[in-house]
Image (cartoon, rainbow, N blue to C red):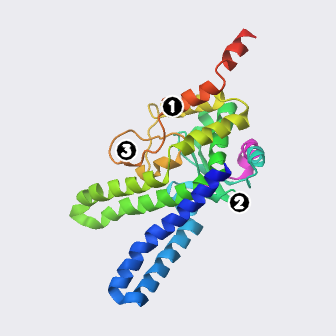
Amino acid sequence: MRLAAARNVAKAWVLAGVLAAPAGAFGYAADTWNGLTLFVFCALLALAALYAYGDRALLGMLGAREYALAEDPILRSTVDTLAAKLDVLPPKLYLIADGFPRAFAVGRGPRSSALAVSTGLLGALPPAELEAVLAHELAHIRARDVLVQTLAVLLAVLLVDLSRIGGWLERALRAALAPVAGAFVHLLLSPKRELAADAVAARLCGTPHGVADALVRLDRASDLVAFEAHPATSPLYTVDPFAPEGLAPFFATHPPLALRLARLRGAAPDERANGRAA
């Protein structure tokens, strides 16, 4: 997990360099070294703002509000217990008033993060499966996946939404920008991060079957409950909630559900059978 965290920090620095380089080139073309210095400084300042406030921007965009302790002390206690096991500072809890079951984590890492859950998730999952989903999201926090996810998703959202300035060319501009934003997301976010988070959640919960059952339930929810959100936010969720249409396929970074279930069920294939036999 430490190696994964180091990789994510390195990705964040590479991202800063990749975004600052074109700004520097543009500045150099406009006013040689003075322009280069100014434009690079502005680019790094914008990235610093994304780093500091990107999580709040995403939470606000997705309609999340801060979750009060009095609303559900058991939820807070469960998150705190899992966070202690992972040596993570307990994240701030947020609630999304939405019947579609979903959860996601944003932030910068183990010492600064936020975890959002929907009302649909709290109502749909039994305690064991809810714990598994929370453990999965906390595993992303521990590995600093949230650092890269937050930056990548927010930048992808901004890039796609630039098409709105195209006026009557909006559709053509979006068709050009969406693949670029999707490629950018895929370069930064590997499907392996979901498999690793599944494995950590299974270890924390003591069994992989709670995680597997939760994934199946969340996957089937899309057939039962309507869901709407910006398609570029797809990498944030425990299970991709978007139908494979429109812009959504450009931002699909989750591994196939069958692969995730096979990895989890294979970790303890006889556990349920033994339970029934007993």
Query: Badge 1 is on which residue?
Result: 259
Mark 2 or mark 1: which comes first in sequence? 2
Left or right: residue 158 compared with residue 89: left
Q: State the predominant SS element of the stretch in magenta.
A: helix
Q: Residue at coordinates 66% horizontally, 48% vertically from top-left?
A: 1
User: Pointer 2: residues within 10 angstroms few (<14), some, or many (20+)?
Assistant: some
Task: Inspect the image, locate mark 1, and give the three-letter code of the amino acid beneath it.
Answer: Leu
State the separation of the CA atoms marked 2 and 3. 32 Å
Q: Position of residue 252 (x, y in %)?
A: 43, 44
The region drawn magenta spans: 65-79
Q: Is residue 69 magenta?
A: yes
Left or right: residue 27 compared with residue 269: left
State the separation of the CA atoms marked 2 and 1. 31 Å
Disc 1 is placed on an element classified as helix
Disc 3 is placed on an element classified as helix
Q: Position of residue 87 (x, y in %)?
A: 76, 51
User: Pointer 1: residues within 10 angstroms few (<14), some, or many (20+)?
Assistant: few
- Residue reaching furthest to the left: 168
